[in-house]
Image: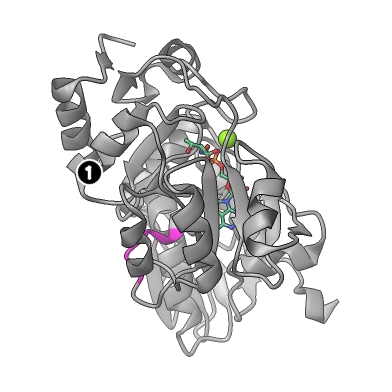
Amino acid sequence: MTGRLRRADARGLAAAADLLRRGGLVAFPTETVYGLGADATDDRAVARIFAAKRRPRFNPLIVHLPRPAEAARLVRWSDAAEALAARFWPGPLSLVLERRDDCPLSPLVSAGGPTAALRVPAHPAARELLEAVGRPIAAPSANAAGRISPTTAAHVVAGLGDAVDLVIDGGACPVGVESTVVDLASKPPRLLRPGGLPRLELEAVIGPLAAGEETATPRAPGMLSSHYAPSLPLRLDVLDVAPDEALLAFGPDPPAGARITRNLSPAGDLVEAAARLFALLHELDRSEASAIAVMPVPRTGLGEAIRDRLGRAAAPRPEEG
Ligand code: TXA
Ligand code: MG
């Protein structure tokens, strides 16, 4: 970490906002834990979050907004959402809602699925930063995958080092545990992650919550249904392709002859490949091909998460047994 720590004053936050608008990674304080932020509308910036955290999977990420009014532009807003937002935003509550058709968020923040988790944090530095950036900011906790969430800037520096472009030091986080995550896209609403806002306070507003499960750790195949699965069959690690197949290529030398070819990264760059993965899968799935043939992607770096996601997309569907 080379002098990339700055105070949460006007100049520090202006520098942070500038970096975020240019696709950079900025760790910043929220009232719950420090977040590792990136422009949530920029595929490549969001992919860099996964690389910095060394996450072996594309978990969906929480998207941070400066004001509740911004949410309705991104997701299908509802009465329950309005009631919870009016009562608890800004604060340690994240709401999972269906993405609008014209939702500008990167598909990576939703792990390719139909929903997005939104929250308006209460921490003054976070709010000032979000206002200054003027874009939704994806921010998981600013720790390496599998490590404890950071509640001081020193934790972030120790855990992520120079994988972050800038760390804003706003002191210790007052809440210290992550936000409570409620899924309002399912009926009845589900508590996906207990957190800084107690369940009873939520239930007082919208009634009983069903038990949920973090989508990060789906156990039954049915749990994958909230994720995007292509309707065409997938053939993985192919080096040749049939004329009626769609080819999802990787690297400089894809085989010729596919019905349609899209390349995750002609240069073989795994951050670029992650950034393009879900959009290209969607595009090929809409083609007239018989199947999607996927070239080998190396297991290193973000390759592990890319391969995990492709493996899930290729797995037998629940309704197929
Ligand atoms: O307090 C917090 O929420 C912190 C600060 C930085 O705001 N952020 C945080 O983000 O904890 P993260 O990425 O570490 O936690 C994301 C969790 C996922 O594991 C999942 O449980 C849930 O939020 N989540 C996010 N998007 C979702 C979605 N579309 N559907 C279901 N769950 C989602
Ligand atoms: Mg986390």
Please, what is the three-letter code of the amino acid marked with disc 1? Glu
- Between 303 and 113, the residue placed more toward the observer is 113
- Between 293 and 312, the residue placed more toward the observer is 312
Magenta stretch: give its range.
103-107
Tell me if residue 249 comes above or below residue 187 in the rendering.
above
Q: Quadrant of ligand 2?
A: top right
- Between 95 and 277, the residue placed more toward the observer is 95
For numbered disc 1, what is the local secondary structure?
Answer: helix
Tell me if residue 57 comes above or below residue 290 in the rendering.
above
Which residue lies at the image location 59% right of the left edge and 31% below the top edge? 145
Residue carrying label 1: 131
Tell me the quarter of the picture where residue 175 sits.
top right
Q: Quadrant of the C terminus?
A: bottom right
Which residue lies at the image location 47% right of the left edge and 28% below the top edge? 142
Which residue lies at the image location 38% right of the left edge and 24% below the top edge? 163
Q: Quadrant of the N terminus?
A: top left
Tell me if residue 114 comes above or below residue 219 in the rendering.
below
Residue 169 image offset from top left, x and y in percent: 33, 16
Residue 58 image offset from top left, x and y in percent: 55, 49
In the picture provided, is 167 more to the left or to the right than 152? left
Residue 199 image offset from top left, x and y in percent: 70, 47
In the picture provided, is 198 more to the left or to the right than 318? left
Which residue lies at the image location 25% right of the left edge and 51% below the top edge? 135
- Between 156 and 317, the residue placed more toward the observer is 156
Task: Give the farthest residue toward the bottom.
Answer: 288
Task: Inspect this view and state whether residue 295 appears.
Answer: no
Task: Inspect this view and state whether residue 145 appears.
Answer: yes
Majority SS type along the magenta span? loop
